[in-house]
Amino acid sequence: MVTALFADLVGYTKLVDELDPEEVRSRVDVALGTLGACVARFGGSLEKFVGDAVLAVFGTPAAHDDDPLRACLSALEMQSTLASLGAGSDRPLQLRVGIATGEVVAAVRDIGAIRSTALTGDCMTTAARLQQLADPGEILLDDATVLAAEPRIGADPVGDRVLRGKSRPIAVHRLRDERRRTPIVSRQSVRLVGREVERRRLAEVIERAAASGRGGAILLRGEAGIGKSRLLAEMEAVARAAGMAWTWVDNAPHLVDSPYRGVRSMVDWLADEKGVNPGIMGRQLLLGAESDEETSSLMLAAVAVIARDSDMLLLPEEGWSQPARSIADPAELASALRIATDSWIAHLAAEQPRVVVIDDFHWLDPSSRLLMDEMVRISGDLPLVVLTGTRPPLTPDWVSLPHVEVIELGGLDAAATEELGTIVGGAVLEPESAEWLYARTAGNALFVGEIMRMLRATGRISKVGERLVVDRTAAQRSVPLSLRALLGARIDALPPTPRATLQVAAVIGAVFHEGLLRELQGESEVTDDLRQLADAGIVVRCEDEAGGSGEVAEPTGCWRFRHQLFHDAAYGRLLTDRKRSLHAALADRLETAEPAADAAELARHRMAAGDVERAVPLLERAAIDAESVGAMTEARAFKRAAAALKEGATGSDAVS
């Protein structure tokens, strides 16, 4: 999954007609270099310069959780930077940008002596066509990009357009701006489901702080998509009803290297709340009360460091003056920052009891984390509640403090998953479809919502009577575009060896045995790889999922993917040739195993290997085996698959 960005300079031809070619080349080179820097800043990959245009991709060679957002922010910065370059010129260059998100095949291409990586996919062409459709200064997006980047961007619908070379119209949007200081809850969010216990506990802490004047902190920990942000956003109404102010600090992976970004975001939120300039807001909170000269000097020097590292402006008209001292010693700086933070938070809480949410704490920049950690530590003595949402395994050292509580947020149970599926689907799910949805998502709220929306959009869910029925065969390998980037980023974050092991495991199936994996991988040892995959929350030992007495079971060598979607995402990242060779090797191994694999499993691997000649008799045998135990539905499916193969259908078309 990648997001492609195509940007074209407008005015190049006119410049060539009017100016010296060397001057034109110089101006264009500066402009293209600037555009390339904007791509690099947001973690994109510069694919090529095509004349006076730039092609960039976000999501390869490494994926991130927010590649569509990164592409949009890069495009906005391109436009503003190019406008600055052309300020005062009578012949300014302008930019048209097209952005599209989708699946590509990335493969090495050898042509003669030239070796390069080629990306092939519809989104590459779509981005180029959107760029051609755009007006100068305009950024056009496809629907997939908007859905993935919202609500962090503002975009206006342009309407459906038929792009050159396309047979069907696509929805086109115009990128307007970046949205800041807004709780990141999707426009598609539905009412909160299945979190009554956790919601009640969060509300109790907030209401107790409002009544007693003594706050605390909660670390809400759970995997991506489990519903942390949604649950935290639900607390705003509780806080305001209790008379407490509300502050939301969101974080993102592309901002983790921006010093003091989290602190700056909090000051900006407070300034917006009071309708004043952030510089004035910061000074009122930090130096609003009298303090001794030495302390004031230390705090001012600490703020000067933050301002320098974060490009904040401390203007004299806002009451700021140059610090009388500088801080060079790291220990003294840490002490000064702590003093400044304590003073700032104390003044903040004194004005009004407050709830501060630090969402995606795992992406908080390190400089801000030092200050936010201090805020958590002193919250127990102030009318201040700090709520943080993070992914495992992050465990800050302050979780051991008596006024801090950790809430582990797991997946929704089967009943809540069915309820959420019903809400998104618009009707009650029939029992088997509800069971399928729970097995596929393990109760991950984001997965449930996105899968139900995809099923509706693709016609893979139908209403029979008063209930919804999922076409599970058609949906078996389907992973919504919105989830592919998220799951792909989790996989790409792995070291190369565990990542390769994961893909081989995916060929075996959602459940696999360590010994078989070792043989298929051709490695003497895969235990360390599996341990790393387990630490990443992607696989789990079968016995760990079994539940029961609570006793620690002896390892059996059996592993399973934590979510079916992780299995499908890992499997889908294999190129066809590699996939076929692994399936063929696995089928060869299973045929000689004791006890031998059943005919249906062997048929599945032979079909996936493209070996129709050996797959057909296996399917016919599987049909006979199914009939012998009265499984007539399965028998008919095997017979249909065998007939389809004989008629020339591919293995993937014949059976799921």
Image (cartoon, rainbow, N blue to C red):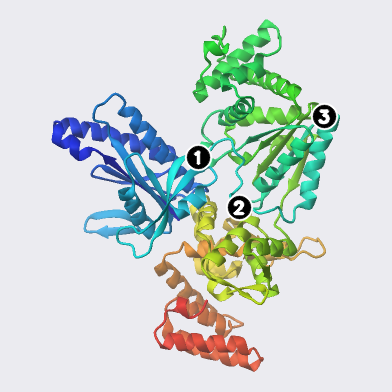
Q: Which residue appears farthest toward the right when viewing the image? A: 212
> Is residue 158 or residue 478 the one in the foreground?
158
Q: Which residue appears farthest toward the front when viewing the image? A: 159
Quarter of the view holding residue 367 = top right
Quarter of the view holding residue 475 = bottom right
Quarter of the view holding residue 264 = top right
> Is residue 617 or residue 227 the one in the foreground?
227
Residue at position x 59%, y 56% in the image: 533
Disc 2 or disc 1, which is closer to the eye?
1
Disc 3 or disc 1, which is closer to the eye?
3
* Residue bearing mark 1: 254
Q: Which mark is residue 536?
A: 2
Q: Position of residue 576 (x, y in %)?
A: 41, 68
Q: Residues within 10 Å of mark 2 (few under 14, many from 20)?
A: some
Residue at position x 71%, y 9% in the image: 290
* Residue bearing mark 3: 214
Residue at position x 80%, y 26% in the image: 381
